[in-house]
């Protein structure tokens, strides 16, 4: 008696595992379809690029600075001619640039963003602070003296360092006119720096540029971000941290959008082709032959690597950044993959899909009146005693399918991999 109970328990556990493997296998195939459709939609609408542009908009409230960042050759968020950092444009022109067609750029290196922001914000302040100094040095006769002074001035402009060295070098300028002009400019520069209250810090031009930002919101944000920076290196670090924080929020927003999209796509497919998790699980439990067959198919796909390859291709397609001239080709390939996945689901011979069969000739208690795949059974006048319970179970089964498929194929692949290898 005990031996029979042990055998029955073993068979019951085996049946449960086979049902789990079969159901998860169906969910994985549907999840791959959902991933492919999501990617097609995201690329067609440039959803990732739009999400990035929204994040940049939240960072840069000033439309003029935003337009210059948008069109910078290192970023190119929109399809428009580049606007030079020192170029004067109106607010209306900047907003017109922002409405230009969006490019396919969906990622910006933090260091690149910082470089562009520094160049843009410092452009006018560099000219205002150091423009006269640069013009005088460039007007000197060619020779070692001009080259040496130009190198010193470049150091001052780039990082605000070397002002003392430059001042000391002026006494050795041979031409009295240039020596006097440069000394006056350096004195004026010292006075302006003193008025800014920043001392001879390495990012004095940046602080001056921030004060010239027209938009009060961006000006206050940049002032706060840079308040603790004592030199240009620290300022760059603060700006990069500011950008990274915004990108983390943008990534979370994009993930949430894709999760909602996954739920919608999974719901559409589950309803259209009737993928009912509860009905599938019941069918597998009641049919040992089909249960074993589906379990063997899932196990073979897993162990042969075919299932992992399908998931990898879907994820690779989702992560790749397709150019405009390859999007059509990729869309065709993805469409073919979706059709193949749906064909694989159909080939499982599970209760997937709808049918309409008139059962008026059968008695009310006939088992066909409880078939969840027959739309005829859901009409109250056709099945007055059972349509409510049937509809409730169908809604629960579809809901389970939608929630499960939205988790993604890699999630369920890891679970079924552990179950099979136990």
Image: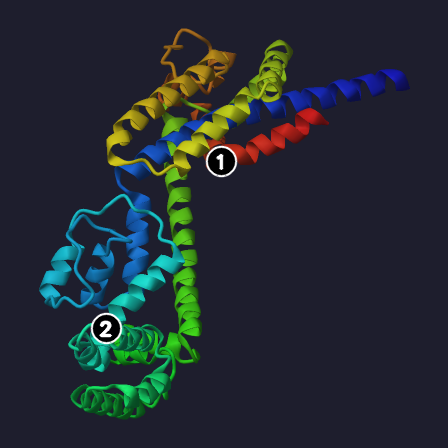
Q: Position of residue 160 (x, y in %)?
A: 34, 79
Classify residue 388 by image quadrant: top left
In the current view of this chain or complex, which residue is farthest to the top? 361
The front one of 72 and 77 is: 72
Residue sitting at 41 percent across and 52 percent down? 251
Position of 182 compared to 162: left or right?
left
Q: Position of residue 294 (x, y in %)?
A: 58, 15
Classify residue 231 by image quadrant: bottom left
- Say if residue 299 shows up in the picture: yes
- Secondary structure beneath dot 1 equals loop
- Secondary structure beneath dot 2 equals loop
- Say if residue 353 shows up in the picture: no
The nearer-to-camera label among 2 and 1 is 2
CA separation, marks 2 and 1?
67 Å
Which of disc 1 and disc 2 is earlier in sequence? 2
**Residue, disc 2:** 143
**Disc number placed over residue 408 in the picture, else none:** 1
> Quick check: 177 above or below 356?
below
Q: How many marks?
A: 2
Q: Quarter holding the C terminus?
A: top right
Q: Position of residue 398 (x, y in %)?
A: 45, 30
Position of 45 compared to 139: left or right?
right
């Amino acid at each position: 008696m005990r031996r029979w109970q042990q055998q029955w328990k073993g068979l019951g556990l085996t049946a449960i595992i086979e049902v789990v493997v079969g159901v998860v296998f169906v969910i994985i195939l549907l999840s791959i379809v959902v991933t492919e459709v999501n990617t097609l939609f995201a690329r067609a609408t440039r959803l990732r690029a739009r999400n990035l542009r929204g994040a940049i908009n939240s960072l840069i409230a000033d439309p003029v600075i935003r337009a210059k960042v948008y069109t910078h050759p290192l970023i190119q968020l929109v399809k428009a001619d580049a606007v030079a950092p020192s170029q004067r444009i109106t607010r209306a022109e900047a907003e017109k640039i922002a409405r230009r067609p969006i490019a396919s750029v969906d990622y910006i290196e933090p260091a690149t963003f910082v470089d562009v922001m520094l160049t843009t914000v410092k452009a006018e302040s560099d000219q205002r602070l150091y423009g006269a100094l640069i013009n005088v040095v460039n007007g000197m006769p060619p020779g070692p003296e001009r080259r040496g002074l130009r190198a010193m001035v470049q150091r001052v402009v780039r990082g605000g360092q070397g002002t003392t060295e430059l001042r000391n070098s002026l006494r050795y300028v041979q031409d009295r006119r240039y020596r006097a002009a440069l000394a006056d400019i350096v004195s004026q520069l010292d006075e302006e720096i003193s008025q800014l209250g920043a001392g001879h810090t390495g990012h004095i031009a940046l602080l001056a540029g921030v004060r010239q930002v027209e938009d009060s919101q961006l000006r206050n944000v940049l002032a706060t971000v840079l308040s603790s920076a004592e030199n240009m290196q620290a300022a760059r670090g603060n700006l990069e941290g500011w950008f990274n924080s915004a990108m983390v929020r943008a990534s979370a927003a994009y993930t949430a959008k894709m999760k909602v999209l996954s739920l919608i796509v999974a719901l559409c497919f589950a309803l259209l082709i009737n993928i009912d998790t509860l009905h599938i699980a019941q069918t597998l439990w009641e049919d040992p032959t089909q249960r074993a067959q589906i379990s063997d198919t899932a196990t073979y796909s897993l162990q042969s690597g075919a299932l992992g390859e399908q998931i990898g291709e879907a994820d690779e397609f989702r992560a790749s950044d397709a150019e405009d001239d390859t999007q059509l080709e990729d869309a065709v390939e993805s469409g073919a993959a979706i059709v193949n996945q749906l064909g694989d689901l159909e080939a499982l011979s599970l209760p997937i899909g709808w049918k309409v069969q008139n059962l008026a000739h059968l008695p009310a208690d006939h088992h066909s009146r409880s078939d969840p795949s027959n739309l005829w059974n859901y009409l109250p006048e056709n099945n007055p005693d059972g349509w409510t319970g049937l509809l409730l179970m169908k809604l629960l089964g579809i809901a389970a399918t939608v929630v499960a498929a939205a988790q993604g194929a890699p999630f369920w692949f890891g679970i079924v991999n552990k179950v099979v290898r136990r």
